Amino acid sequence: MEFDDIGDVDGVPVRVPADDGYRACAVCGGDCELDTWLSANGSGVRIAFVCPEHGVQVVVDPFEHLR
């Protein structure tokens, strides 16, 4: 899978899949809004793409490539 760098967090690169199909709502096809959060179980940061009408569409682990 190919990734795009979207910045960094404290010097650690943040990457998301290069195929941006995950950014569209599966129900209405609309653009999703970006939301980030730290996971409650201490496993790191997650990026969610959220449709304002239909909720969370996908959650991306930007550090998956480092595991």
Image (cartoon, rainbow, N blue to C red):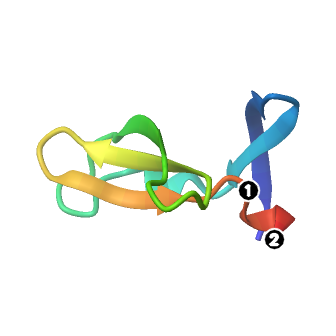
Element carrying mark 1: loop
Task: Estimate the x, y position of residue 17 in percent, counting from the top left.
Answer: 67, 57
Task: Estimate the x, y position of residue 67 in percent, counting from the top left.
Answer: 81, 71
Compute the Cα span from label 1 to label 2.
Answer: 7 Å
Task: Estimate the x, y position of residue 40 in percent, counting from the top left.
Answer: 44, 55
Horizontal side, residue 4 vs residue 12: left or right: left
Count every numbered label the image shows and give the total: 2
Kind of residue sitting beneath label 2: Arg
Which of the 4 quarters of the picture holds residue 66?
bottom right
Q: Which mark is residue 13?
A: none
Residue where numbered disc 1 is placed: 63
Q: Residue at x 85, y 39 (%)?
A: 12
Q: Residue furthest front?
A: 41
Horizontal side, residue 32 vs residue 12: left or right: left
Q: Residue at x 32, y 58 (%)?
A: 57
Residue where numbered disc 2 is placed: 67
Element carrying mark 2: loop
Kind of residue sitting beneath label 1: Phe
